[in-house]
Amino acid sequence: MNIQKNDTVKVVAGNALGKQGKVLKVFPERSRIIIEGVNVVKRHSRPSQKNPQGGIVQKEAPIHVSNVMVVCPKCGKTTRIGRSTVKDATSGKDKKMRVCRKCNEMF
């Protein structure tokens, strides 16, 4: 899965089409992510110690990874992500880096 926590993504399919936000949580085993302010659902909650009033609570629901694209931090466009190997200067080992397919910027 190419999407990581704190990436900026844009929704390209579904009810939240066109919305953009930061990735809050990633579920790689289910191929789903939670995006800040996207796919907000309402849940009824009973009164508890954490929420003594109870009532209707709004929270973000997971969205499938195939419905979003990563926004490149440099060029600001939605892009696919490539992989590139770079030799680490300190350890001398090869490191895999994520690369923007449009501007070839590593992130």
Image (spheres, rainbow, N blue to C red):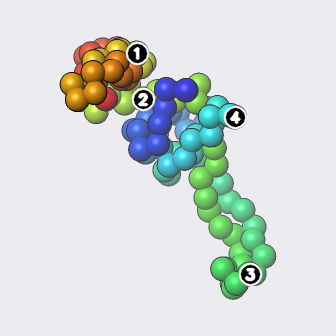
Choose between 6 and 44: the one closer to the eye. Answer: 6
Q: Which element type, helix, strand or loop, lies under badge 3? A: loop
Few, some or many C-alpha atoms within 10 Å of disc 2 (few <14, some 14-19, many ≥20)?
many
Instruction: Tell me, for residue 30, which label it has, or none.
Output: 4
C-alpha separation, residue under disc 4 versus residue under disc 1? 22 Å
Where is residue 26 shown, x and y percent of the image? Answer: 57, 41
The answer to whether marks 1 and 3 mark residues whose Cβ atoms lie closer than 8 Å is: no
Considering the image in quadrants, where does the N terminus appear? top right
Residue position for label 3: 48
Where is residue 32 shown, x and y percent of the image? Answer: 63, 36
Residue position for label 1: 82
Give the amino acid type for the residue marked by disc 4 in the picture. Answer: Arg
1 vs 3, front mark: 1
* Above or below: residue 80 compared with residue 72: above
Residue 42 seen in the figure: yes
Residue position for label 2: 70
Where is residue 90 shown, x and y percent of the image? Answer: 23, 29
Dot placed on the residue nearer the N-terminal end, 1 or 2: 2
C-alpha separation, residue under disc 4 versus residue under disc 2? 18 Å
For the point 49% across and 26% down, which residue is it? 2
C-alpha separation, residue under disc 2 versus residue under disc 3? 38 Å
The answer to whether marks 4 and 1 mark residues whose Cβ atoms lie closer than 8 Å is: no
C-alpha separation, residue under disc 1 versus residue under disc 3? 46 Å
Give the amino acid type for the residue marked by disc 3 in the picture. Answer: Ser
Few, some or many C-alpha atoms within 10 Å of disc 3 (few <14, some 14-19, many ≥20)?
few
